[in-house]
Amino acid sequence: MEKNDPENVVVIGGGAAGFFTAVNAARFNPDLNVTILEKSREVLSKVRVSGGGRCNVTHHCFDPELLSKAYPRGENELRWSFEQFQAKDTVEWFNQRGVDLKTEEDGRMFPVTDSSDTIINCLMKEADGHHVHIRTKTKVDAIEPLDDGGFRLHIHKSKPITCDRLVVATGGYNRDNAYSWLKDLGHSINTPVPSLFTFNFREKIFADLAGISVEHAEVSITGTRYSEVGPVLFTHWGLSGPAVLKLSAWAARELHDKEYRYDVKINWLYPMKDQEVREKLRDMRDMQPRKQIKNQTEFPFSNRLWVRFAEMASIPPEKRWADMSNKEIHELTEQLVHATYNIQGKTTYKEEFVTCGGIPLNEVDPDTLESKLVPGLYFVGEVLNIDGITGGFNFQAAWTNGWLAAQSIGNG
């Protein structure tokens, strides 16, 4: 191999997966010369914005089998990866470096400081302590495998770099041609499509209710098997919240194929069914005949949302309960239990965009993340066809990928 001041190990991409690979490889083998190349101005930018700036590090699910079920793509492979490094190990890794994590009610885990800077500072300190070099504003245009092993990296507007082993941790791309430089190495690509996005209404029927949420609704995509239960949040454009984001992940490819035009069906009172709701409405008519429809405390809705449901059932909110007909009760029940909305379009979830697609998992060794096609080449993080639902799962996949690759590199 041509040795012109080579780097022993180069990691392309300074996100969570790439950084974790680099610092752990350097820790496992202090003789390695490890360099991170990041094309943007700063490393760990997605870590910084995650969780509204608090960094959703992982999820409090310490059972590898259950943990793996949070991944629409990658479940089978991660099932065994998590036996080596799972969420519990992530918590311990950060704890050993002075970072304590806390668990919120929904299982998401954050640093007790509620600041992503805590995680970034920890990783930067680890990089400094193990002499990991970091080069920002360094874009790799092409990877050239060398005849006698190793790689020459062609750097945009700069001199090439050679290395013995190479880790690609560039994250997910939103278009197929962005993977062309990896296709040149002989790898195929699962076409990238967005995951984790909000559902946009064709008609802005709830736009003025943005910010209101329902804590326990069932959301289904009509004509498919996909259904989720959980909080739903109204936005200016449509629907978001954990139930919607989970659905967007599981149904990412089908919704892409539908060009994001489909219907969703929502039971706003799950697990209540229509008969139970209808009887409750009749009881309200009998028990509070003089009250106006708009005044109710039996259902877990804000007053503004309740009034909107009544209006969508063509019931004047000022109408008295005593004047409610059976037909109106039926129509209101339909709005509460069998509501159907037309969706046209999506909005990527904040800055925490996730891509479904990338390097097929059958082209890498599941134990090491090394390419089966190009010796010495590794793939970690979202550049692989792995993605999880919202809640810290995508970061956990990044930590696990990074750990496995680092072990192989550091001990290899």
Image (cartoon, helix red, strand yellow):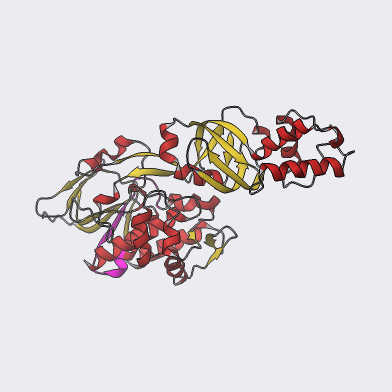
Q: In the image, is residue 40 part of the stretch drawn in magenta? A: yes
Instruction: Give how far across and how far down residue 372 sits, in percent.
Output: 20, 53
Residue 329 shown left or right of residue 180 in the figure: right
Instruction: Give how far across and how far down residue 30 sits, in percent.
Output: 27, 69
Where is the N terminus found, in terms of image quarters? bottom left
- The residue positioned 44% from the left and 31% from the top of the image is 258
Where is the C terminus found, in terms of image quarters? bottom left
Q: In the image, is residue 157 part of the stretch drawn in magenta? A: no
Question: Which range of residues does the magenta coloring cover?
Answer: 25-43
Q: Nearer the viewer, residue 403 or 272?
A: 272
Instruction: Give how far across and how far down residue 198 sits, in percent.
Output: 53, 39
The count of marks equals 0
Residue 181 seen from this side: yes
Residue 89 shown left or right of residue 371 in the figure: right
Which residue appears farthest toward the right when viewing the image?
A: 290
Residue 131 seen from this side: no
Image quadrant of residue 236?
top right
Which residue appears farthest toward the bottom when viewing the image?
A: 96
Instruction: Give how far across and how far down residue 169 sits, in percent.
Output: 32, 51
Q: Nearer the viewer, residue 307 or 152?
A: 307
